[in-house]
Image (spheres, rainbow, N blue to C red):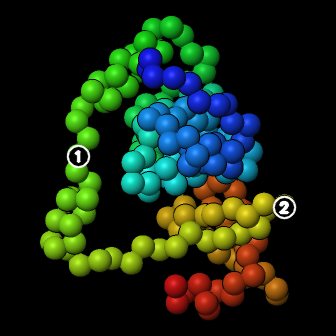
Amino acid sequence: PGRGRGGGSRNGAEAWDDCLALEPVLAFLDIRMPGLTGLEVARRLSALAAPPLVVFVTAFDDHALAAFEAGAVDYVLKPVDDERLAQTLTRLKARLAQPTPDTAALQRLLATLAPPRSVPRPIQAGVGREVVLIPPDEVVYFEADARYTRVVHQGGDALIRTPLRELLTQ
């Protein structure tokens, strides 16, 4: 608020690229975006050294929990009224006024306290002409086929060429 405006992205991949290029302090995302979803962009942003504050502005009320798990600061439903927008701006201003933690020092402290854990890699699946990254915790089940494995996840389903035997070892 009051610091300038970045570009409007036409899809999730552009939003991700724009955030990497512009390093914004905050990002407004929708849940459903072509390419990467807003949730996928938010998860990627949360892994950055200095992630922006993320606000979801969407017509979909059933993804709020996932949005906050992905690091969202707020979740605003469309159509947005002035009072609700004012609440969001107040929340953002308060967050921006807080001192930023020394993340490098916190990482060093965590490294001394806990052994490193292996983080499950996302599953890469082809959907049409795009590659979708499916977080393992969103997988509902796998179904083996003659040549492919069907991955049914919270956002739909996709086909991968990895056999079930290999998935079990990962």
**Which image quadrant is residue 162 in?**
bottom right
**Distance Cα–Cα, label 1 vs label 2:** 41 Å
The circle on residue 144 is none
Q: Which residue is label 1 attached to?
A: 101
Q: Count residues near mark 1 (Cα–Cα under 10 Å), then give few for <14, some for 14-19, many for 20+.
A: few
Lateral position of residue 159 relative to residue 3, left or right? right
Cβ atoms under marks 1 and 2 closer than 8 Å: no
Element on which disc 2 rests? loop
Instruction: Evaluate whether residue 123 shows in this view.
Output: yes
Work out whether residue 152 or residue 50 is closer to the camera in this orientation and state it.
50
- Residue that appears at 65% across and 75% down: 142
Q: Name the residue rendered at 39%, 78% in the picture.
A: 118
Foreground residue among 42 and 149: 42
Q: Look at label 1 and name its amino acid.
A: Pro
Q: Is residue 86 above or below residue 24?
A: above
Q: Left or right of 62: which side holds 106?
A: left
Which residue is at a point 21% across and 67% down the rendered structure image?
108
- Is 102 left, or right, of 134 in this rendering? left
Q: Quadrant of residue 143?
A: bottom right
> What residue is at 44 percent from the left and 56 percent from the top?
47
| Place of residue 9 in the rendered image (x, y in percent of width and height, measured from the top left) | 69, 36
Q: Is residue 54 visible?
A: no
**Residue wearing tag 2:** 129
Mark nearer the viewer, 1 or 2: 1
Crowding at mark 2 (Cα within 10 Å: few <14, some 14-19, many 20+): few
At label 2, the amino acid type is: Arg
Q: Position of residue 14 (x, y in %)?
A: 69, 45
Q: Estimate the x, y position of residue 18 in percent, counting from the top left.
A: 62, 43
The N terminus lies in quadrant? top left
